[in-house]
Structure formats: C-alpha cells, structure tokens
Amino acid sequence: MGYTECVSFNVAVVGATGAVGNEFLKLFSERGFPINELRLLASANSIGKTLAFKGQSVVVSEATKDSFSGVDVAFFSAGATRSRELIPSALNAGALVVDNSSAFRMDPDVPLLVPEVNPGDFNSNTRLISVPNCTAILLCVAINSLRSLGTMNRLIVSTYQSASGGGAAMMHHLEAETRALVNGTELPTTKLNHRYAFNLFSHNTPIGEDGYNEEESKVIEETRKILGMPDLKINVTCVRVPVLRAHTETVTIEFDGAAPSVEVVREAIANAPGVRLVDDRASNRFPTPLDASGQGDVLVGRVRQDLSNPNALCLMLSGDQLLKGAALNAVQIAELVLGIAK
C-alpha cells in the first residue's frame, strides 16, 4: 500500500459503543490518526446514539454488510460472530481490516500481529490482520526481548484478569455488586456462576475435554503463533479477579541451559519497546493493575532466578487490557501497515 503521512483515511469502528470502541476514539485523538471521515457502527440497539470525538458528536449507525462503501480502514471489536458476518463485506469494499475478535486469529493466512514483537508478519497484499488475545499480547511484549538471551523451552503462566476483559457490562457489574455488598443491599443479577466482588474464580470460558478453558487455550496457541515458536511448551492457568481494569500475569521462563542473570534480564526489559521496568526491591514496588491502567506500556518486574531450577527465571507483568491488550495494539497495527507508525 502506498500510503504516506499526508493522507487521511475514511475509518469505520464496528463495536463503537463498547469498552474497546471508546478507547479507539481516545487513541485516534491522542495519536493524531489521520481521519477524513469517521463512521461509528454498532448493533441495532445503538442506532441514533452519539459519541464525542474531537469536540463533535458523531451519530452511531447500525453495522450491516452495506456499511463499508468508501471505508479505507475498518476496526472490528464486536465479537467473533459479527466479525465472521461482516468482515468479508469490508474486505470486498477494499478496506484494510484490523479485527479484535478471535474469528480469524488462528487462520494460517491471517497475520496475528503485535508490532513490538512480529512487525514483519504481513506483506503488501495483507488486508486482514488479527489482534491477538489480550493476555497473549501482554505476555509476548513482556518476554520478547529475552529471546535474544537464550532459547526458551517452556513458559508457565498464571493470570489475574480484570473485569475489563469481559467488556463494559462486566465492569459495570463488578462496580454494582461491590456497592451492594458494601451497602448491604440486594446483589444485582448476573450470568456468572460466581459472586464477583471480593472473590476470584477460574476464567469464565467453557472448559475443553483437556481440562483447559478457552482463554487458556487461546493464550497457548496464539503465543506460539506470535513468537513463531509452534513447539514452545506453555502451561497457563487463567483466573478472573475483582479488578476493574488491566490484567496481571506471573511467568516462569525455562531456558535451554542456564538462565541469563537477573541483571542482564533487567537491562533487556528496560530497553524493550512497549515495556517499562518496575522492579524496585528496596521499596517493594512492582507492577500493579492500577499503575498499568490508562497507559500503553506493559509493566514488568519481580525479576528473579527460579530457586528450584537454575535454567529458569520468574517475572511479573501488568498491562491495560483495553489499551495494549486491544485498542492500542489495533491502532498500532494500522499505523504500521499504512506506513504512518509513530
């Protein structure tokens, strides 16, 4: 594509009224994404709503197969079903499509892109790119710089995933349930199998025959694809915690041979793009979801040798699921492909 910085684009956002959709609008303004026309699309229930963008009110329209005429770039964040239904029409209309759903992530012909990790996994003919699972994005950004320090044989990951991963509705439910418990009033109804406030539970996705839930399987499969390491051994346990925004993960990395020193690892992390080292042992200050929320870096700390295995080291990370785990990664993909990367 022969795009240059002086070009502006007709942009569509499918799922504009959701939590990730709102982040797109903020990012377009903050990053100066060159927009000629902004088309906000959502379900029929949202027809006529307005969203603010650069001081103006933009009316939301229904997302249909006829919504993409003249669109240059289409960002999708409305779930896999809607992506499968509408993306072919967007592609036929000539749009570059960046899809935040799971619909095409494991399609071998569709790049699964994290710009800091695998920016070369597309070519001039690429018109559909998938945004990976949020947990996989944060993990890959955090550990990518360590790949030059030795061959990784295995990852052991435990996640502490916030309500933002379930969208605006889950965030609102956690707030409402917390207020009800604090005030001693009736709890709001929920489709969850567990009380959320002051609790944690195994990630609320279906369990497969192997005992792993869908979220865990996504992290395993997508991490391998992003890193280009199809045989990488990965074990993941995903847990939902009563935090509004930003996911946290603890990671053990096993190497083929002795693990690099903590000092070398800390230096690599500190110099990695999209990463901020937060590793102050003296003050016991390490990554937290509160510090990660509202900004685009993946915070990494708790770097230490695994005392049980000289070939392994451990770390902890936090990252904003709505930003680097979703909308920010999508916008960075578009900037990369269009040749307007910051």
Image: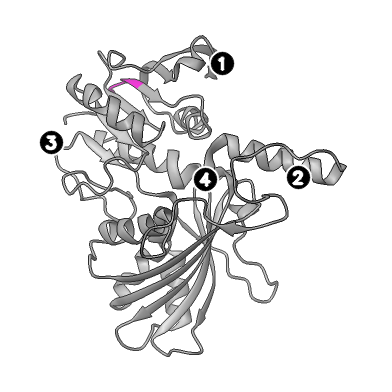
Q: Quadrant of the C terminus?
A: top left
Secondary structure of the residue carrying numbered label 1 = loop
Figure check: 304 above or below 239:
below
Report the residue at 64% width, 76% height from top: 281
* Amino acid type, residue under disc 3 in the picture: Asn
Q: From the image, tell me which residue sits under label 4.
A: 165
Q: Badge 1 local density, few (<14 within 10 Å), some, or many (20+)?
A: few
Q: Disc 3 or 1, which lies upstream in sequence?
A: 1
Q: Disc 1 or 4, which lies upstream in sequence?
A: 1
- Measure how far apart labels 2 and 4 are at the Cα level: 18 Å
Write down the region rendered in magenta: 6-11
Q: From the image, tell me which residue sits under label 3.
A: 125
Question: Which x, y percent locates residue 335?
Answer: 32, 36
Q: From the image, tell me which residue sits under label 2.
A: 178
Q: Disc 4 or 3, which lies upstream in sequence?
A: 3
- Measure how far apart labels 1 and 4 are at the Cα level: 28 Å
Q: Is residue 242 left or right of residue 79?
A: right
Of the two numbered discs 1 and 4 in the rendering, the one whose residue sits closer to the viewer: 4
Q: Is residue 9 magenta?
A: yes
Q: Disc 2 or 4, which lies upstream in sequence?
A: 4
